[in-house]
Amino acid sequence: MSFTDRSDAGRQLAQALVSYKDQQPVILALLRGGVPVAAEVAAALDAPLDLILVRKIGVPMQPELAMGAVANGGVPIVVRNDDVIRMAGVDDTEFEAVRDRELAEIERRRKLYLGNRAPVDVAGRVAIVIDDGIATGATTRAALRATRVRRPSKLVLATPVAPTDTLVAMREEADDVICLEDHEFFGAIGFYYVDFRQLSDREVKDTVARFPAPATNQTIQSTSS
């Protein structure tokens, strides 16, 4: 086992990202496992924490098999796995129906975890996307593309562990990739943690609440007037 739990992984990852502290980055966590990892990084780098909401688009008759992923960081970004779509015989209407259900679930989760809190503005800033590990990379790719359209000055992917070949593909999506461990024969993310239990909604909400949204220019003007 490489990490005691996600907080341990986050503390180790923060050490690898310390050079970004002076660049005032924004930390974006993937649900749910990425949240405690990202929280440790955000605390160490004194950076705002926000969520990047991504959902797998599963094959209708086999939901665990990903035929794509969708992320919503403002403008929805869809990543298609065309090989799986062809193999499963899924047509565009079926794909779009599942996509729309997942977009609705993304909106439900944003309200659950963040309420009316506006997304942190990443335009012109270093955006660091964090998860507790990467397997196939479909959801990670969607998260990176959704963040890219928000015009960060630099897009960084940071994760404790990932397959070696997946990291090669991720380097085509991000400007910098920080991974503490990569393995040619990977297995599952949970193999690299002693404690890999699923987080509850309450734990996610409480963690995000520790990092208040930064004041916008409009808020600052209202306060000072």
Image: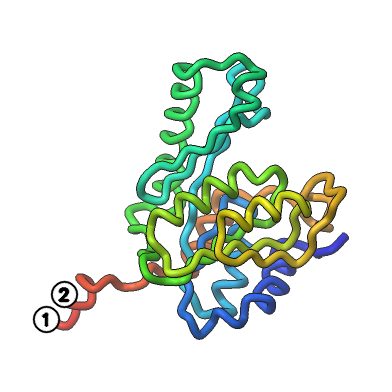
Q: How is the image coloured?
A: rainbow
**In contact (CB < 8 Å): disc 2 and disc 1:** yes
Q: Which of 139 and 49 is in front in this view?
A: 139
The quadrant of the image that shows the C terminus is bottom left
| Image point (41%, 51%), residue name | 73
Residue matched to label 1:
225
Question: Which residue shows up at 55% across the image and 49% down it?
Answer: 201
Local SS, label 2: helix
Query: What x and y, as percent, mark residue 58?
Result: 59, 28
In the picture of the structure, the residue carrying the numbered disc 2 is 222
The reply, left or right, for residue 149 in relation to residue 29 is left
The crowd level at tag 1 (other Cα within 10 Å; few <14, some 14-19, many 20+) is few
Q: Residue 63 carries which label?
A: none
- Looking at the image, residue 197 sits to the left or right of residue 215; the answer is right
Name the kind of residue labelled 1 in the image: Ser
In this rendering, the count of numbered labels is: 2
Q: In which quarter of the image is the N terminus?
A: bottom right
Q: In the rendered image of this protein, does residue 49 appear above or below residue 33?
A: below
Q: Is residue 149 above or below residue 65?
A: below
Q: Which residue is drawn at 56% across and 76% down?
A: 43
The residue nearer to you, when weighing 84 against 26, is 84
Q: Where is residue 29? Give x, y as percent.
A: 55, 58
Whole-percent x, y for residue 220 in the image: 22, 77
Residue in the picture at 71% in, 50% down: 166
Q: Which amino acid does label 2 sit on?
A: Ser
Q: In the picture shown, does residue 59 fall above or below 207? A: above
In this view, the residue in front, 13 or 155, is 155
Which element type, helix, strand or loop, lies under badge 1?
loop
Question: Crowdedness of circle 2 by 10 Å Cα count: few (<14), some, many (20+)?
Answer: few
> In whole angstroms, how far apart are the C-alphas of marks 2 and 1?
5 Å
Quarter where residue 108 is shown = top left
Q: Nearer the viewer, residue 86 or 224?
A: 86
